[in-house]
Amino acid sequence: MTECIFCGIAAGEIPAQIVADDPEFLAFRDIAPKAPVHIVVIPRRHVASLAAAADLPEAVRARMPVFLAEVAELEGLGPTGYRVVTNHGPDSRQSVFHLHWHVLGGTLLSDAM
Ligand code: AMP
C-alpha cells in the first residue's frame, strides 16, 4: 500500500466517493467538506504541491484547469459559481502532500479565505 493517501485513492486502495475519472486526473468528495459541494481534484501522478507542477507533463498541466471546470459543471456549480483553491506549505495549512485542488460551492462562500 502506498504511503500517500491520495495515491492510495487513485490506485483504488483507499475508498473515496469518486465524482469524475480521467486517465490523468481524479475527482472525489472531500471527507470533511467545508461547503455543500467540496470536491478534491488530483493529478494521478504524484507531485507534492503546486510548487512541483513543473514536474508534470505539459499535457497534464494544460488539461488541469479544463478538468477542474468540467468537474464544477458536473456538480451543477456553473450557474451559481464556485471557488477553486490549492494549498502549498505550512502557511496555507496544506495537510496532504499530493497536489490537489479544492472545488467549493453550493452556497454563497465566505469572503474570508
Ligand atoms: P489540504 O489541507 O489542502 O492539504 O487538503 C486536504 C484535504 O483532503 C482536506 O480537505 C481533507 O478533508 C481531505 N481528505 C483527507 N483525507 C481524505 C480522504 N481519505 N478522502 C477524501 N478527502 C480527504
Image: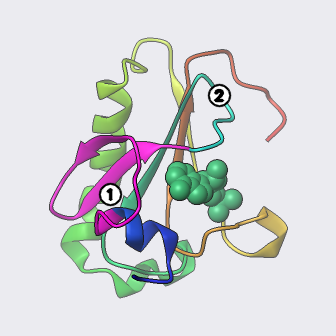
Q: Residues within 10 Å of mark 2 (few under 14, many from 20)?
A: some
Residue 74 placement, left or right of 53: left
Residue 13 placement, left or right of 89: left
Task: Say which quarter of the image contains residue 62.
Answer: bottom left
Q: Which residues are magenta?
A: 10-30
Circle 1 residue: 64
Find out if the beta carbon at label 1 lies less than 8 Å from the nearest ligand 1 atom. Answer: no
- Check disc 1 and give the amino acid type: Met
Residue 31 magenta-drawn?
Answer: no
Question: Where does residue 80 sit, x and y in percent of width and height?
Answer: 50, 13
The residue positioned 63% from the left and 36% from the top of the image is: 33
Circle 2 residue: 35
Find out if the beta carbon at label 2 lies less than 8 Å from the nearest ligand 1 atom. Answer: no
For mark 2, give the secondary structure.
Answer: loop
Question: Where does residue 70 sit, x and y in percent of width and height?
Answer: 28, 36
- Report whether residue 86 is seen: no
The residue positioned 50% from the left and 70% from the top of the image is: 5
Report the front residue among 24 and 16: 16
Task: Say which quarter of the image contains residue 46.
Answer: bottom left
Residue 24 placement, left or right of 98: left
- Check disc 2 and give the amino acid type: Ala
Q: Is residue 31 above or below residue 109?
A: below
The residue positioned 78% from the left and 64% from the top of the image is: 93
Give the position of the N terminus as an image quadrant.
bottom left
- Report whether residue 75 is seen: yes
- The disc, 1 or 2, on the residue closer to the chain's N-terminal end is 2
The residue positioned 22% from the left and 49% from the top of the image is: 21
Give the position of the C terminus as an image quadrant.
top right
Question: Where does residue 53 sit, x and y in percent of width and height?
Answer: 43, 77
Q: Quadrant of ligand 1?
A: bottom right
Residue 24 magenta-drawn?
Answer: yes
